[in-house]
Image (spheres, rainbow, N blue to C red):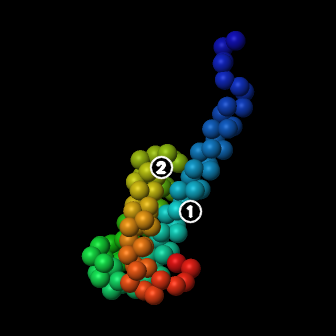
Amino acid sequence: MAYSAPLFYDDVVVYINLLVLILSLVVQAVALIHCLTQRGDGFQAIGTLPKGAWAAILAVCIVLTLLLSGPVGIFSLIGIAAALIYLLDVRPGLKDLSDGKGFW
């Protein structure tokens, strides 16, 4: 009776960490792809960082998440935060500048 957790506890933790890592990479990749497909002058028009700065931030976050961080490491959390700030703040501003139509 040395262990109080079930025998499959470690397997469940590994699968949950993998799922969180995949979801964080998907969110970061969507933000980066959206950033790369937008016009550069739109970023200046809404008063945010330039397109190059956002692309660099998002790309560096993806690389750090893949190389240095686990699914709940500090770089992964920073990457998710940067991607969500882009998707929830910058993306709607860019969409308001355009006609508002389209998938993005």
**32 vs 42, nearest the viewer:** 42
Residue type (three-letter) at the residue carrying disc 1: Val
Residue 101 lies, with reference to residue 78, above or below; the image says below
SS class of the residue under badge 2? loop
Please name the residue shown 48% across and 75% down the image: 34
- Can residue 43 be seen from the camera position used here? yes
Q: In this view, does 44 lie above or below 53?
A: below
Residue 104 numbered tag = none
Local packing at callout 2 (Cα closer than 10 Å; few below 14, some 14-19, many 20+) is: some
Mark 1: few, some, or many residues within 10 Å (few <14, many ≥20)? some
**Secondary structure under the numbered disc 1 in the rendered image:** helix
Q: What residue type is labelled 2?
A: Ser
Q: Nearer the viewer, residue 93 or 37?
A: 93
From the image, which quarter does the N terminus lie in?
top right
- Residue sitting at the far right: 7
Q: Where is residue 99 in the image (x, y as percent from the top left)?
A: 45, 87
Side of 103 where 92 appears, left or right? left
**From the viewer's perspective, is residue 6 above or below residue 65?**
above
- The residue positioned 45% from the left and 56% from the top of the image is 80
Real-space Cα distance between discs 2 and 1? 15 Å
| Residue at left offset 30%, top offset 78% | 46
Residue 98 pos. (x, y %): 42, 86
- Which residue is at a point 48% across and 69% down the rendered structure image? 31
Residue farthest top in this picture: 1
Q: Return the x and y of residue 65 as percentages of the image width and height.
A: 48, 55
Q: Which of marks 2 and 1 is nearer the N terminus?
A: 1
Residue labelled with disc 2: 69
For label 1, the residue is 26
Disc 2 + disc 1, Cβ < 8 Å:
no
